[in-house]
Amino acid sequence: MIKAFEISPLAQAADADRRLGMRKSVEVEGLFESFSRREWSALRAATPLTLSKGDLESLRGINEELDMIEVEEVYLPLSRLLNLHILATQQLSAVTDTFLSTAPAPVPYIIGIGGSVAVGKSTTARVMQSLLSHWPTHPKVDLITTDGFLFPNSELTRLGLMARKGFPESYNTPALIELLRRLKSGAKSVTAPVYSHLTYDIVPDQEVVVEQPDVLIVEGLNVLQGNGTSNNQFVSDFFDFSIYVDADEATIKSWYVERFLTLRDSVFQNPDSYFRNYADLSVEDATTIASGIWDEINAPNLALNIAPTRQRSRCILTKGDNHRVEKVQIQKS
């Protein structure tokens, strides 16, 4: 085992803080410190690369250009930072248990990952799940998506919300909050609904079981939005750390259209696909439809509900038009 794992968490945290403080070219934007890709990459320190090129194939999203360089220069430093936070939180929890003379109650460290449709949230979540699971003190890392908490299509139709699928009101937010509340209360097992991107709907009688993970990653459009319950609780209240994946809107739209065209030639060809009627469109017609969906649904949702949550995250990953992260911002407090 390498030395990075043997140094105490608090000592590592102090060293990380020292490194951050030494950055002379740091750009301060409000509560955030901004790092170029080169500056951020240097913070990897001795963190080992635990993924192979073969692993990347299962982690990469549609039309995304994820390579080993991206993992080494962007995601490994983020993995190191998160590991320090997780270990410090575990130590603080142990101190509290000692003070209260109570038995340790394992609760997960919860990470929220938000951002626009087609910006690469899912890939970021899968990469971080894989990297974090290789750290020895928190090997069990689970991942759930907020797609499972969308209301079924039948309910969205009844409510007149099918055209606003993905907007805050289309989610069963109280159910998601209850799942996170139970996990943070030490529940041994909770279940989450399953969503199918093939049928574009909740899968009846199927569920994901989450059993006391060391770390839980929650990925979705709405994870940082201020849509609470009647007792004024919010999904983000249960997050220990949050990440916002960002890019220029015109760039994200181009990715969305490219993904739509790829799906037209693959998933949409499946007879069970909800979007089967798009499978035989010409490139021109498919491009027009995808652009219309973006302009009518995804763009307003991004502007009204998603982009405003950017400043509420602890970390912002800003991508360029080649899907590569060009800048990383970390909240100082």
Image (cartoon, rainbow, N blue to C red):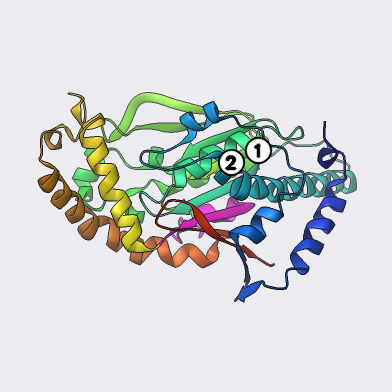
Is residue 11 positioned above or below 303 on the image? above
Q: Compute the Cα span from label 1 to label 2.
A: 6 Å
Name the residue: 80% across, 36% down.
104
Q: Residues within 10 Å of mark 1 (few under 14, many from 20)?
A: many
The residue singled out by tag 2 in the image is: 128
Secondary structure of residue under mark 2: helix
Q: Residues within 10 Å of mark 2 (few under 14, many from 20)?
A: many
Label 2 sits on what residue type? Answer: Met
Picture quadrant of residue 122? top left
Label 1 sits on what residue type? Answer: Leu
Between 286 and 184, the one lying in front of the other is 286
How far from the left and from the top, in percent, is residue 309?
47, 63
Name the residue: 39% across, 63% down.
248
User: In the rendered structure, does residue 16 fall within the stretch colored magenta?
Assistant: no
Is residue 48 positioned above or below 113 on the image? above
Q: What residue span does the magenta drawing correspond to?
A: 224-247
How far from the left and from the top, in percent, is residue 282?
10, 41
Secondary structure of residue under mark 1: helix
Q: Contact (CB < 8 A) between labels 1 and 2?
A: yes
Q: Quadrant of the N terminus?
A: top right
Q: How many marks?
A: 2
Name the residue: 58% across, 41% down.
128
User: In the rendered structure, does residue 236 fall within the stretch colored magenta?
Assistant: yes
Name the residue: 15% across, 49% down.
289
Between 200 and 64, the one lying in front of the other is 64
Picture quadrant of residue 280? top left
Q: Is residue 263 rendered to the left or right of residue 34? A: left
The residue singled out by tag 1 in the image is: 132
How far from the left and from the top, in percent, is residue 20?
74, 64
Q: Quadrant of the C terminus?
A: bottom right
Specify whether residue 165 is in view. no
